Image (tube, coloured by chain):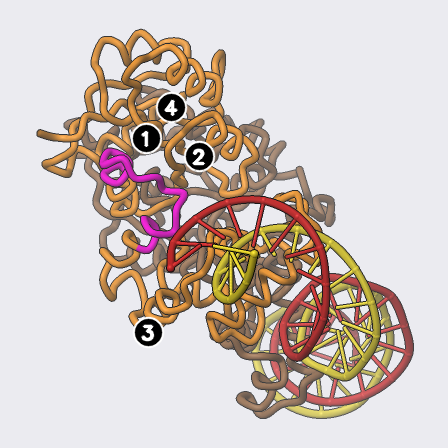
Chain colours: A brown, B orange, C yellow, D red
Amino acid sequence: MPVRVLLVDDEPLVRAGLRAVLEAQPDIEVVGEAADGATVIPLVRQVRPDVVAMDVRMPLLDGIETTRTLLRTMTDPPKILVVTTFANDEYVYEALRAGADGFLLKRARPAEIVHAVRLIAEGESLLFPASVRQLAAEYGDGGGNRAARARLERARLTERESEVLRLMARGLSNAEIAARLVVGTETVKSHVSAVLGKLGARDRTQAVITAYESGFVAPG
Amino acid sequence: MPVRVLLVDDEPLVRAGLRAVLEAQPDIEVVGEAADGATVIPLVRQVRPDVVAMDVRMPLLDGIETTRTLLRTMTDPPKILVVTTFANDEYVYEALRAGADGFLLKRARPAEIVHAVRLIAEGESLLFPASVRQLAAEYGDGGGNRAARARLERARLTERESEVLRLMARGLSNAEIAARLVVGTETVKSHVSAVLGKLGARDRTQAVITAYESGFVAPG
DNA sequence: GCGGCCCTCCCCCGCACGGGGGAGACTATC
DNA sequence: GATAGTCTCCCCCGTGCGGGGGAGGGCCGC
């Protein structure tokens, strides 16, 4: 029986590449794709993959939070293979701390990618034996890595903040948003500031761009 | 006769992705791959591609130098489509100055990648609004809002105004746009005001929304 | 030559925006 | 009861933004 793999990456090109590489193998089967963390959880429950090849940096819900959610909510969770562009990505450590089983560089050769998936599927902790994982676990504890934590927070918009961002993405001013939500303009300003901070945006225009680029709002 | 494409990227995964996406089209044929700029030149002479999809950042010989060499040394050089990860990559502008015919983001949708290759092959430059709008038009209502597109068509933005709108849609401030275009901030303000007026937008955020909704700029 | 368009730059001016604080009320969780 | 998170509203304050208007130079077509 083949290894069932689910691909999670916000870039279709990367997904197509992984699919091409993996499906060339008779013992590996790509059973699904997802573009962001939010759609992964129900998809995993549906298709029951053995391995999830997951990008760390994704809009709205990143690979770390998705990994945490998967491992926390499922009784028999799939193996998590973290896929990343940069080797010294602080996200990687965070993901491993969250319980990922291994990590893989996007610039790896096809043979390495295939090898990684097979190893992960067999229960091996690729490139990260227990000692290294322990190291990763201690890394960033005690509120150490503020930058990574801050970026992590950005993926977590509250319900109200999401609502505000949606209205911003429709071109509404703070006053108009306040009127629509029946709250004060100062309240809206608070939410807007929170959104800007979490998204790493300098102004509302950049926030709206992020909303479009991430698929949070879709054109048309 | 199909469009003959040569893929140049140091990451096998990206090449596999591009190959998968492009070869799904009956009118496009991938005739070769290269991992760095140095091996591209003899390969181009050998396989004679119509389009070279080339990464900017590569080891040994980057996409810019490779583009320069190709255009300088060949009598009938192929079209150069610059492929990059980051939208505001300084290398991209340098590559375009070196003579590349267009640029494409790696996070683009497969349909956009295919369209880009076809347009480049037909001799159109992806830099000009006409082709970008055509790309948007071919998406139909799935990729763009008809009203927004009509508004953009009616607006008849000048070349400079289109350029400014593109930069606005990347989240740049007036000062940043001025720096990039090497003009004064007051000049940029004039262009921005003209864009806002022609698009019927109240502020830059609404203008950027129109740009996305019309397909003038495409989300990842 | 002349008008028209475009690009460039300048002035004044009002204001919405965004940063940096703080604070009370409600809910949930332990 | 304590803690944490969210939502709500308030203050001050600087500035980037956009409106309105004007102006010079380059290029084109009539």
Dot 4 amino acid type: Asp
In the image shown, does B26 or B211 lie closer to the viewer? Answer: B211
In the image shown, does A206 or D26 lie closer to the viewer? Answer: D26
* Image quadrant containing the N terminus of chain B: top left
Q: Is residue B201 left or right of residue A198?
A: left
In the image shown, does B169 or B156 lie closer to the viewer? Answer: B156
Q: Distance between the Cα atoms at labels 4 and 3? A: 39 Å
Dot 2 amino acid type: Thr
Q: Which residue is mark 1?
A: A117
Quarter residue A196 falls in: bottom right
**Of callouts 4 and 3, the N-terminal one:** 4
Counting other residues with Cα less than 10 Å from the Cα at mark 4, is it few (<14), some (14-19), or many (20 or more)? many
Q: Which residue is mark 3?
A: B147
Secondary structure at numbered mark 4: loop
Residue B157 visible, this angle: yes
Question: Residue B196's spot in the image, x, y percent?
Answer: 53, 69
In the image shown, does B22 or A214 lie closer to the viewer? Answer: B22
Rendered position, D15 above or below A63: below
Question: Residue A34's spot in the image, x, y percent?
Answer: 32, 51
Dot 1 amino acid type: Val
Q: Which residue is mark 4?
A: B9
Residue at image coords 52%, 34%: B93
Quarter residue B151 falls in: bottom left
Secondary structure at numbered mark 3: helix
Q: Distance between the Cα atoms at labels 3 and 1? A: 47 Å
